[in-house]
Image (cartoon, rainbow, N blue to C red):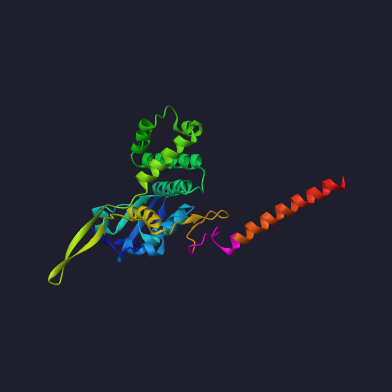
Amino acid sequence: MSTDYEQTERIFWPRCSRVEVEGDLFYCQLARERQYDPVEAYAKDPHLQFLNCRTAADVQSFVLEWGPLDYLHREEKRDGLAVRRISECLAYLTWLQALQRMMEACKGRADWRAALLEFVRAEKQRHWNNRGNIPDLIFAQSLEFGVRGDLDEWIASASLDLVQRVVIRCVENKAMGPQGCLKVRSKGRGFELKPALELLSLWDALIWMLWQDEWNGRQPRPCPECRKIFRPPTAHDKKYCSPECAHRATNRKWRKKDLRRRKREARGRL
């Protein structure tokens, strides 16, 4: 499946010429001469790069390469400088990682309760950072699924079937492609139809890329050894991200097996 789309409001997102840290702020100098199309950037997997960030320094490097995450205001476009709170950028990162973990739970690769708890906490962190109120999604879940009292305690005590239903609803509501339509363009003496989609920011594009992975059957997965999110290079199921991780895991299993063997032999000599 290709990514041959137009965009209903086509954007070219700016990279940064430098990103400086001052307190809890990123000062992002926009490199408007180095703009790129987020749809075409999908081939370089920026969403996987972001998912693999672990620290504020990692996010700083990501923003330097791909630009600010969210919408640029008119003044920022005019002045070429965007200022973002580091804590909010980290909240975006935690949220996207939690969404990806819930998708892994739906594939049987992660614990349902732990994935939902992680997402609920990320949803609170991201929205409370931005607006200081309870996220609409959590409020809606409380009404729809009859949640009473503390949501964390409810996740721990609710039936697995109910937890799964909430996870599925979250994934379906959040891991979505952008709005699509058909655009009619003149071509020579006639016209042509072309599928179009709407991406208004890098953040929109990152979520779309997760959706696009599933649409294309190119699902990334976490390495069980180092937890890096990677895309297996072939259709065959590859468990580890690198030969080094596979070697470490194999050696650890062999050592455990050898230790059990020696314990059995020691007991036999008693």
Location of residue 154 with respect to 34 vertically, above or below: above
Task: Please say whether residue 105 is one of the residues in the magenta stretch.
Answer: no
Residue 37, image x, y percentages: 31, 63
Location of residue 269 with respect to 217 vertically, above or below: above
In the rendered image, the residue lying farthest to the top is 149
Task: Please say whether residue 242 is one of the residues in the magenta stretch.
Answer: yes
Residue 178, image x, y percentages: 30, 52
User: Residue 189 occupies which quadrant of the picture?
Assistant: bottom left
| Extent of the magenta region | 233-245
In the rendered image, the residue lying farthest to the right is 270
User: Residue 44 occupies which quadrant of the picture?
Assistant: bottom left
Identify the main secondary structure in magenta: loop
User: Residue 144 occupies which quadrant of the picture?
Assistant: top left
Location of residue 144 with respect to 197 vertically, above or below: above
- Residue 30 falls left or right of residue 263: left
Residue at 44% from the left image edge and 32% from the top image edge: 151
What quarter of the picture does the C terminus occupy?
Answer: top right
Most foreground residue, 197 or 9: 197
Residue 26, image x, y percentages: 38, 53
| Residue 60 seen in the current view | no
